[in-house]
Amino acid sequence: MFDLATRTALVTGGGQSVGEGIARTLGGQGAHVLVNDIVAERAHRVVDAIQAAGGSAEAVIFDVTDLDAVQRSCASTGVIDIVVNNAGNGGAEGMRPRPFKDMTPADWEGPIRVNLYGVLHTTHAVINGMLERGWGRLITISSGAGSIGVGIGVSPYSAAKGAGQAFMRSIAVEVARTGVTANSVALGLMENVAGGEVTGPLAKSIPVGRLGTPDDVGAMCVYLASDEAAWVTGQTVHVNGGSLTT
Ligand SMILES: NC(=O)c1ccc[n+]([C@@H]2O[C@H](COP(=O)([O-])OP(=O)(O)OC[C@H]3O[C@@H](n4cnc5c(N)ncnc54)[C@H](O)[C@@H]3O)[C@@H](O)[C@H]2O)c1
């Protein structure tokens, strides 16, 4: 089960943290992994790690907010069966929580561009190929903050993540008869939040008693990317140690 040996998977922002875990896990299940990042060294390091583990991977360097670059790069890599839209600013980089009343447009343009436009761009670049081949998997890494109000000063990020979930739901229904599925994976608190290991009350507030790991997310992506998940589409799957139960 969950054999991805015939598939090529693009993982955006795959050069570290959650994206690295997703790329490595997909590679471990046999997928040829296109490891994207805006920072070339990060992508190349993950490619080396996947290859060292016996897998197949190559680096594709582009900025997901740049539609032309996304389209050029996706066209030149050939068939893409699976896209995991992971690039975002959920970790220490780019996440500076503060009240919306103190924000300026610059504070919301960044989160919206990477977390929402990035998803639209990659989807637009690959969807025609998926429809022609009659098989595809679109997976967007989201956040609990896109599903509920979190009140921690990340409202533009929440808006972008919620919109990404809505986009996956909508496109899922639009292409439902074609063999292409679209889902979101909404994460809770991950190990790299705030740039380091989080312990104490924050970790203890999670029902299972620990922060999430990239492998936790990778395993869900493998499932959603598989043939076996053909009947799972338009969903937001929460991977969060029980923090948000709906
Ligand atoms: N870390 C968390 O606690 C957490 C919680 C909920 C959701 N998430 C989501 O998980 C995903 C990964 O988060 P993370 O914590 O691993 O982030 P991270 O900042 O550790 O890593 C993100 C990677 O994406 C790359 N990247 C950033 N902008 C890019 C762009 N425009 N184009 C291409 N690559 C780009 C970065 O270089 C980096 O390697 C994000 O979508 C985030 O919103 C994270």
Image: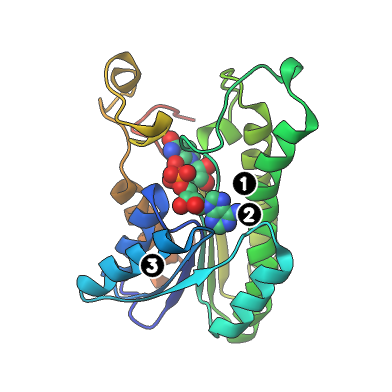
- Identify the image quadrant of residue 225: bottom left
Contact between marks 3 and 2 (CB within 8 A): the answer is: no
- Packing grade of label 2 (10 A; few <14, some 14-19, many >=20) is many
Q: CA distance from mark 3 to mark 1?
A: 29 Å
- Please state the total of marks drawn on the protein image: 3
x, y (%) of residue 15? Answer: 41, 57
Q: Position of residue 173 (x, y in %)?
A: 67, 60
Distance between mark 2 and mark 1 Cα atoms:
5 Å
Tag in front: 3 or 2: 3
Name the residue beneath numbered marker 3. Answer: 44
Determine which residue is flagged by label 1: 165
Q: Residue drawn at (60%, 35%), measured in percent from left and top?
A: 146
Q: Earlier in the sequence, mark 3 or mark 1?
A: 3
Q: What residue type is disc 3 on?
A: His
Q: Label 3, secondary structure: give it.
A: helix
Can residue 234 be seen from the camera position used here? no
Dot label at residue 178: none
Question: Residue at the location (58% across, 65% down)?
Answer: 62
- Binning the other alpha carbons within 10 Å of mark 3 as few (below 14), some (14 to 19) or many (20 upward) gives many
Of tags 3 and 1, the one toward the viewer is 3
Residue picked out by circle 2: 168
Q: Vertically, is 24 above or below 160?
A: below
